[in-house]
Image (cartoon, helix red, strand yellow):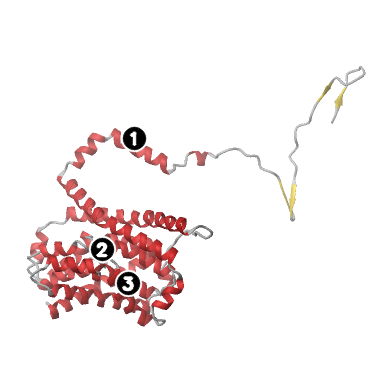
């Protein structure tokens, strides 16, 4: 420590040198410590979720009069009705599917599926398709459950067969179909047969032609080292936030298209045999109705033939707007862009042939 003196005896003042920055040698490179300068301007400008939500709420309050006027328009009222209807129908079954998915991921050992399904994928596909009978849910429930099956090591072909069959052949849906068509009990058998055929055919088709790089393995955070209860609820929260977001996007798209499609188009299409089948197939995709409720909508379309209405019942639970969004979010966009069109085309052909034979 240096001592400064001024002509007399004894120290007059002492000074402590400022700390010096020292170099540190790491390997063959010399580094200097970097002082903490606090948050950068980019960090300060970053909008986190609470701040963004606050700004949106403030904007809504400031523009409440124009927003109220826009929402009172007939088109917006129709949009809101369809959006809320799709969400109310689908959300309970989405939650059911999420709970089943979490239960499969946490409580069911992977060895169970190895024992329950045949070793050969060609045989596992029809077994998984027939297993769709036991799931009392709709298409929103089948997507997260199929994702859990893939994570558990089930061959994707079998998991996809289950994804397509479960919403259309479970007891709740078949019972609703019987109630909606009391004078046509053959509609229940036709729906069961056509849906199971399409599900198995798509599973076999994916096993034959599908590529691993087209199917993204569903993501899930790791819960190793945590109790089963914590892992279960952590899995539920993850799947609800993930699948629920895509459900909202699909419901918004369905509501938008429903609000702008003229009803006159339906009356024109019903007069042509082939066009009526295609029209109701497209309508099933656009409306995105839950499989527990679609039979009553199909029954109300009395201007169309039974075969066309069967196509509506087969296509809807397998591919619609919200399902496409959820499948893309779960398995990747490359998968959805290939799987959805193939499913749509096969469902139309199989349902038309089945209706010709059984109805």
Locate residue 190: give its quadrant. Answer: bottom left
Dot label at residue 39: none
Dot label at residue 320: 2
**146 and 15: which is toward the camera:** 146
Cα–Cα gap, marks 2 and 1: 35 Å
The label nearer to you, 1 versus 3, is 3
Label 1 crowd (10 A; few <14 / some 14-19 / many >=20):
few
**265 and 149: which is toward the camera:** 149
- Mark 1, secondary structure of its residue: helix
Q: Position of residue 12 (x, y in %)?
A: 85, 19
Q: Is residue 349 visible?
A: no
Name the residue rendered at 36%, 79% in the picture.
124
Q: Where is residue 307 in the image (x, y as percent from the top left)?
A: 13, 73
Name the residue rendered at 75%, 35% in the picture.
19
| In the image, farthest residue toward the right | 9
- N-terminal of the pair, mark 3 or mark 2, is 3
Q: Where is residue 153 in the image (x, y as percent from the top left)?
A: 44, 72
The reply to whether callout 2 and callout 1 are in contact (CB within 8 Å) is no
Q: Name the residue under label 3.
A: 162
- N-terminal of the pair, mark 2 or mark 1, is 1
Residue 323 falls left or right of residue 174: right
Name the residue rendered at 33%, 67% in the picture.
337
Locate residue 35: give its quadrant. Answer: top right
- When the figure is inspected, residue 107 is found, relative to residue 255, above or below; the finding is below
- Mark 2, secondary structure of its residue: loop
């Amino acid at each position: 420590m240096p001592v400064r003196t001024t002509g007399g005896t004894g120290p007059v003042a002492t000074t402590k040198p400022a700390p010096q920055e020292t170099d540190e040698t790491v390997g063959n490179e010399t580094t200097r410590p970097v002082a903490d300068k606090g948050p950068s301007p980019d960090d300060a400008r970053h909008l986190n979720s609470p701040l963004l939500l606050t700004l949106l709420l403030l904007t809504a309050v400031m523009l409440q009069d124009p927003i109220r006027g826009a929402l009172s328009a007939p088109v917006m009222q129709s949009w809101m009705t369809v959006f809320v209807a799709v969400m109310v129908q689908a959300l309970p079954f989405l939650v059911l599917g999420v709970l089943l998915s979490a239960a499969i991921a946490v409580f069911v050992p992977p060895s169970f599926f190895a024992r329950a399904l045949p070793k050969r994928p060609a045989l596992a596909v029809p077994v998984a398709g027939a297993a769709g009978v036991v799931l009392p849910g709709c298409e929103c429930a089948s997507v997260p459950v199929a994702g859990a099956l893939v994570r558990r090591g089930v061959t994707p072909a079998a998991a996809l067969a289950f994804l397509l069959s479960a919403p259309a052949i479970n007891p709740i849906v078949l019972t609703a179909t019987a109630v909606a068509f009391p004078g046509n009990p053959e509609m229940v058998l036709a729906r069961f047969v056509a849906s199971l055929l399409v599900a198995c055919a798509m599973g076999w088709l994916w096993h034959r032609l599908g590529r691993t790089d087209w199917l993204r393995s569903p993501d899930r955070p790791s819960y190793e080292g945590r109790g089963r209860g914590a892992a279960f609820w952590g899995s539920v929260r993850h799947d609800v936030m993930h699948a629920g977001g895509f459900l909202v996007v699909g419901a918004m798209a369905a509501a938008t298209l429903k609000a702008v499609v003229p009803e006159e188009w339906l009356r024109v299409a019903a007069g042509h045999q082939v066009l009526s089948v295609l029209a109701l197939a497209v309508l099933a995709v656009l409306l995105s109705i839950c499989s527990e409720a679609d039979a009553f909508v199909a029954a109300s379309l009395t201007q169309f033939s039974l075969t066309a209405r069967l196509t509506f019942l087969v296509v809807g639970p397998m591919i619609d707007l919200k399902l496409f969004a959820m499948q893309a979010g779960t398995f990747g966009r490359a998968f959805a862009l290939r799987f959805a069109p193939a499913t749509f085309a096969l469902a139309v052909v199989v349902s038309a042939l089945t209706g010709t034979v059984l109805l």
